[in-house]
Image: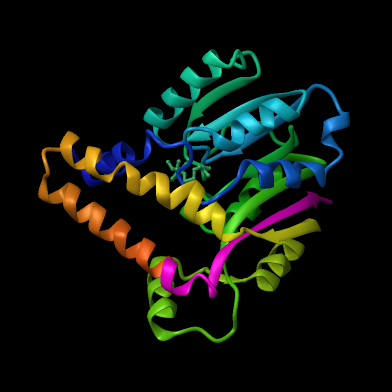
Amino acid sequence: MSNLELLVDLHKNNYRQGPGSDQITEQVLDWTDLESKTDLQVADIGCGTGASTFVLASKLDAKITAVDLFPEFLDKLQMKAKELNLDQKISTKVESMDNLSFVNNSLDLILSEGAIYNIGFQKGLEYWHQFLKTGGFIAISEIIWLSEKRPEEIQNHWQTEYPEIDSLANKIKMLETSGFSLIDSLVLPKTAWLENYYQPLENGFAEFLNRNNNSKEAQEILKSEENEIELYHKYSDYFSYGYFLAKKI
Ligand code: SAH
């Protein structure tokens, strides 16, 4: 298995592939007026196995297109959609988020949790803008700094991993300069990282190693995940995810 395949294998049995919370997704949707509308067109980009997709399906009268680069995640999502009898509302697309096949001005909402970093916040905003109707919403979570002063270790880590990491205020500014009008924002609480993401991930480590015959590559992947988790425990006062809701104007 390649490293990418191993990463998919590590994450595919989990409910989430990144920090988040169903309650917070619901709260962000409550900031919109979409629940009173019918026949909506919605995209969940970088959906993974679909934690947020199912919140969308339960709250909105919408056709939801769940997009991800990895079919293994979408297969899981589709199986669950069938189980929940939501497969009429949800369809999946294997596509890269920087090369989407949506029609221009067609979407009422683009939601993307913990995924836009794959192409970068600025690039993603500018590229996705065209697919929204005027007045359509964008709901995005993105990693942010929580403090101007940062210990060197965590500064260097994120500077290497994702140089676009920035403050909530600067991310908001970027939305405002990319053709959007900000509605509201929040910071994900620690439970969204620990209880909802890292703990379930760690619970699967032993089985992941077993499945992959304790290979050196599998061990390396776990080492890097463990390092990330340790950094979170040490420095959670300095970074989190911001969740932004804005409207295309
Ligand atoms: N939104 C999900 C998954 C977040 S993890 C959740 O919050 O649980 C990031 C997701 O982005 C993964 O599912 C990964 O497969 C997907 N991804 C990575 N690069 C991508 C790309 N270029 N295009 C579409 N999806 C991508």
Name the residue at 46% across, 71% down.
163
Asked if one can make out residue 119 in the rendered structure from this viewpoint, the answer is: no
Total labels drawn = 0
Decide whether residue 235 is among the magenta residues: yes
How is the rendered protein coloured? rainbow
> Is 179 left or right of 149, judged from the image as shown?
right
Figure quadrant of residue 54:
top right
Which of 136 and 195 lies nearest the eye of the viewer? 195
Determine whether 182 is above or below 127 in the image.
below
Determine whether 180 is above or below 44 in the image.
below
Determine whether 165 is above or below 199 in the image.
below
Give percent across and percent down for residue 125: 64, 54
Figure quadrant of residue 223:
bottom left
Give percent across and percent down for residue 158: 43, 71
Which of 198 and 105 lies nearest the eye of the viewer? 198
Give percent across and percent down for residue 75: 42, 23
> Is 72 left or right of 80, judged from the image as shown?
left
Give percent across and percent down for residue 141: 61, 54
Determine whether 238 is above or below 208 in the image.
below
Position of the N terminus by quadrant = top left
Name the residue at 64% across, 51% down.
140
Decide whether residue 63 is among the magenta residues: no
> Is 24 left or right of 70, judged from the image as shown?
right
> Is 237 left or right of 158, judged from the image as shown?
right
Asked if one can make out residue 11 in the rendered structure from this viewpoint, the answer is: yes
Name the residue at 61% across, 59% down.
189
Which residues make up the magenta segment? 233-249
Name the residue at 45% across, 27% down.
74
Figure quadrant of residue 159:
bottom left
